[in-house]
Image (cartoon, helix red, strand yellow):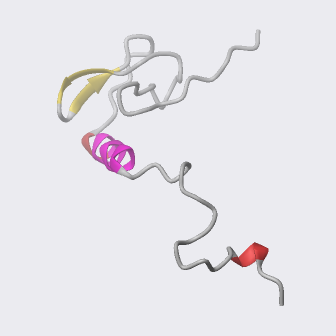
Amino acid sequence: MNTPTIASEAQFKICPLCEESRLVFSGLNEARCPVCDHEPDEDFLKTLRQIIALPDTSELSHSHSSGNPEPENRTW
C-alpha cells in the first residue's frame, strides 16, 4: 500500500520514528507519538524548534535587489 508522506510544519510535527502520526506535546520539552510511543529527547525537540523558526526562503525572488543575476544566470 502506498501512503502519502505527511510533512512537518510549525503546527504539525510528525513522529520522526514511525512518520505515522503527529507528536502529542505535554510540555515544552516533552512529546510522545500515540502510534509507536516514541518520546523524542530534549535535544531533538530543541533542534526541531530551531528549524521551525527559520525563515521560509521558498518565496524569495531569484534576483537580488542590487540587480545582479544569480551565479547560474550570469554570462561571462
Residue in the foreground of this view, choosing between 25 and 38: 25
Q: Quadrant location of residue 49?
A: top left
Residue 52: image quadrant is top left
Q: Position of residue 70 (x, y in %)?
A: 68, 73
Q: Characterize the magenta stretch by its predominant secondary structure.
A: helix
| Residue situated furthest right in the rendering | 76
Q: Is residue 14 above or below residue 76?
A: above
Give the position of the N terminus as an image quadrant: top right
- Relative placement, left or right, of 72 versus 59 is right
Q: Nearer the viewer, residue 27 or 35?
A: 27
- Which quadrant holds the C terminus? bottom right
Determine whether, in the image, residue 5 is placed left or right of residue 23: right
Q: Nearer the viewer, residue 47 or 51?
A: 51
- The residue at the far left in this view is 27
54 left or right, relative to 68: left
Q: Examine the structure image and report whether residue 31 is included in the region drawn in magenta.
A: no
Residue 55: x percent and y percent?
Answer: 40, 52
The single residue placed furthest to the bottom in the displayed view is 76
Which image quadrant is residue 72 in? bottom right
Which residues, given as a range, are shown in magenta?
44-53
Q: Is residue 47 magenta?
A: yes
